[in-house]
Structures are given as structure tokens and as C-alpha cells.
Image: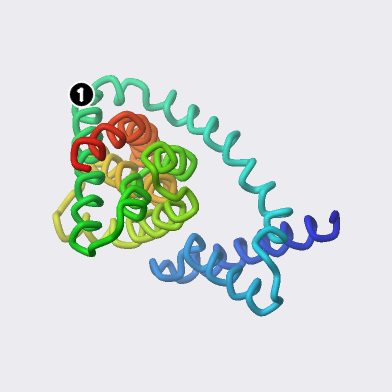
Amino acid sequence: MISEIVTYLTATLVIYYVAKWIYRRFPYVYLSPLLITPVILVVLLLVTHSSYDSYNTGGAWLSKLLQPATVAFAIPLYKNLQTLKKHVGEIVTSVLFGSLMAILSSVLLARLMHLNVELASSLAPRSVTTPIAMNVSQMVGGVPTITAVFVIMTGLLGAMIGPSMFKWLRIEGDIARGVLLGTSAHGTGTSKAFELNPLTGTISSISMILAALFTLVAAPMLLGFLG
């Protein structure tokens, strides 16, 4: 048991840091550690015929680090407190609208693809961070594990195409960029936002939290109304 924990934990860290080193030398979106690491891990598990439960004996320790990592967001929040106070109205309004559109677009997509109710409910909370999304999915009759897959895909795609959207739409403001990444691509988008600059990352982290809260309240009501 201990050997499995050490093996899978070490393998994950080594793969991530190698991928991060490659990304620093060749900063292309398709070489992002957030994309490369899970792909390599999946291949590794398939080749070695290892189950996810076996991997998670070590991988779960990294998941537990999300809590102190989330608390660490308080530091940039404090440093940019005055900017946040100045733009609080725009941030809250934008995140609320973005969260509602994310839910509605998910429901519309599910209907266009003729998905059943269970899959549609699993897709609806895809734009918020995984723990909240899985809880919302369970509340509205979805499958939390399927929701987690949708969340990961949404985050990766958002982080990959976000910078291109900024250039195409000529979005240059740090506030606007942070709101876009945090609302649409949750934690993965926030990681990308901090690569741009600390203020964009701070706004993204706030947007991610607000989007989770709005979705937690709005998703059950909207799905019940549209259902």
C-alpha cells in the first residue's frame, strides 16, 4: 500500500515537472502541463493495467493540497484589494451573466445532441470548479463522475483558446481577461491567468469562486424551469 502511494505520487510529480520544464522552453498551448500530464498518466495506467483506484492511493494526496492552495489565493486578493473594490460591480455582474449563459448553453447543447436528462444534468455545471460541479450535478440528478470529465475538458479548452480569444476580440484589460478565464475555465483558467500577470490571476480566482456560488444556486432552479 505504501509503495503504491509513493510510486504514483512520485510518477505524477515527475511527469508534471518535466511537462512544466518543456512548456517553459516551448510555451505552446498544446504542451501545457495541465493537458500533457493527465494524458501521459492515462497512457501509463493503460500500459501497466493499473486501475484508477490504485493510482488514487497516491494521487489523492495531491488533491488534498487543493485546499491550502485555494487559501493561498487570499494573498493576491489582499494585495489588489483596492482594485477589487473599484470594479466589484462589473465583476459581479459579468460573472453572474457568464454563469447563467454557461448553464443555458449547456442545456441547449444537450438538447441539440439529443442527450438524455441524466447527461444533460451532468453537463450543466461544467464551467465551475470540480467539487462544486459534482455537488450540483448530484443535486439536479446528474452523474458526478461524468460531470468531472466535462469540467476538466472545459477548463483545458478554456485555458488553451482563451489567449487566442483575447487577441481576436482585442481584450486587453486585466479585469476583463480575469473574469473571462475564471468564469469560463475555473481553476485551470485561473492558473493560465496567473501566467499573464498577478492582477489577472486575482480577478480570475474571484470570478471562479463567484461562478461556483452562482451556479450552486442557479443551476437547480434553471434546470427545474427548463426541464
The local secondary structure at tag 1 comes to: helix
Q: Could you tell whether 210 is left or right of 70 in the image?
A: left
Give residue 136's quadrant in the image. Answer: top left
* In this view, 80 is above or below 195: above
Whole-percent x, y for residue 137 in the image: 40, 43
Residue shown at 25%/51% (left/top)? 106
Q: Residues within 10 Å of mark 1 (few under 14, many from 20)?
A: few
* Residue 193 appears in the rendering: no
How many marks overall?
Answer: 1
Give residue 198's quadrant in the image. Answer: top left
Give residue 153's quadrant in the image. Answer: bottom left
Residue shown at 70%/64% (left/top)? 11
Report the quarter where the N terminus lies.
bottom right
Q: Could you tell whether 207 is left or right of 86 in the image?
A: right
Whole-percent x, y for residue 17 in the image: 62, 62
- Location of mark 1 (residue): 89
Whole-percent x, y for residue 227 in the image: 22, 43
Which of these two is toward me, 19 or 148? Answer: 148
Q: Could you tell whether 49 is left or right of 105 in the image?
A: right
- Amino acid marked by disc 1: Gly
In the image as oriented, which residue stretches furthest toward the left? Answer: 169
* In this view, 105 is above or below 97: below
Residue shown at 41%/70% (left/top)? 30
